[in-house]
Amino acid sequence: MIAGAHRHEARDRGPDAVRARLLRAATELLSQRTPFDVTVRQIAERAGVNHGQIHHYFGSKDGLIAATIADGAARYHQDRMHDGQHFPLPLDAANRPAGWRTLAYLASTGAWRQPPFEPSPVVGWLAHRRADDIGRPANDPEVMAVTAATTALQRGWWIFRDMILYALAPFDPDVDAICEDLSTRSMRLLDPIRSEVDEPADVPEAPTVEPALKHDRGPEAVRAKLISATTALLRDATPSAITLKDIATEAGVNHGQVHHYCASKEHLIASCIQHRAAALLESGAAEANIVPIHAERRLPLWRTLAHLAATEEWDHEAYTRSPMVARMVETVAERTGRATTDPTVHGQVVAVHALDLGWGIYRNIIEYGLEPLGGDLVAMRRYLAALSTQLVDPDVHTLQPTQGSPS
């Protein structure tokens, strides 16, 4: 009896058991708080092991966090499988995995680049399942595009769901109806591509537009300097690596003025996003058709968007007034002849916006997962852009863009 108990204890303390306990403990903690608020010691205490075991098995906290995502993704997609179907259904918009903040954290911090992180086996698994369904090789550009689009749409909706719904608030959204419509639309990603797959067009970067100032001094000028300085710093660094002192130095103002004009670093970062969106509309760079998305272009300040989602410290009221989302709603409503409060209008806007955001912040991770297949990633991006047109009704991308001043 005692010998049996010792064997059981040994199994509990073996490498596989310790690794499993750490994964379970990290997953539980990450479902309750942001990754920034979870420490190595907290994970180790919950798992009942020495905190040095985390470094032994995963290299670092970020290595463990990345492993929880891989483990959770595998279980999520397996649960989504249906009888007789190899490829899981693209999106159940009404349900959101507990680790969504962790997805945003990996993208915003670049933690997925750190050893021992390896290409996601789930991305390759999805590509092989899709290949089996349609009888093509896994490295076929269209197969990889469906895998990329599905993954990007999921991540975009899970990570930015709150932000998107706040942005839709002025249009009285029916969240349940939007989720149902979005889930249905996601199935279109599995349909044969209807639109032509063109060579990628050269998409120029949107011009940098400095805040318009009436005076070079005073509160408005100081706030504009802070926004410009923060935007410049965010081009080369993650938001978590930037301090308020860095921003003040870059702006050439007193450190205390940052707190005086902005409630927090996150509030200032959110202001940068708002200014960027307004500048895009004002410059005309955002006046192209809603689809296809520009799969060759990175979102400006993409790490910043992911950081705001991961920390949940974004300014709700400021994002509600997002001019980009409002313009999309008005454009889709006008082209389809529907009201701006119509759930199908909202569903189309959400589908395209979530795909664009998800691809913008998760592109590196998705392509890293596809690289072992040896396919043509440039061709894959062309197919991905074409797939995005299937998320909206035909009238939305066959009519000419509407003209007018940004709202």
Image (cartoon, rainbow, N blue to C red):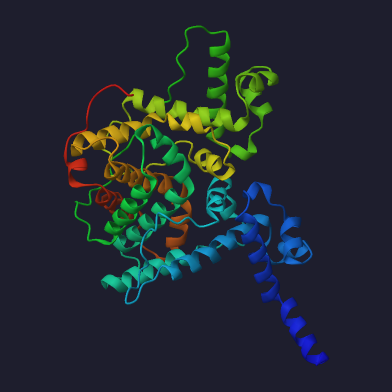
Q: Is residue 395 above or below residue 132?
A: above
- Where is residue 142, by image quadrant? bottom left
Dividing the image into 4 quarters, which one contains the C terminus? top left
Residue at 18 percent across and 36 percent down: it is 337
- Where is residue 406, by image quadrant? top left
Residue at 62 percent across and 53 percent down: it is 32
Dividing the image into 4 quarters, which one contains the N terminus? bottom right
Percent position of residue 74, x then y: 49, 67
Residue at 48 percent across and 48 percent down: it is 159
Percent position of residue 48, x then y: 76, 67
- Viewer-proximal residue, 95 or 53? 95
Percent position of residue 40, x then y: 73, 56
Residue at 65 percent across and 17 percent down: it is 253
- Viewer-proximal residue, 177 or 143? 177
Q: Is residue 308 above or below residue 253?
A: below
Left or right: 78 in relation to 19: left
- Viewer-proximal residue, 212 or 49? 49
Q: Is residue 304 above or below residue 254?
A: below
Percent position of residue 282, x then y: 35, 23
Residue 208 in view here: yes
Q: Is residue 154 above or below residue 127?
A: above
Left or right: 388 in relation to 370: left
* Total numbered labels: 0
The residue lying furthest to the right in this view is 2
Residue 207 in view here: no
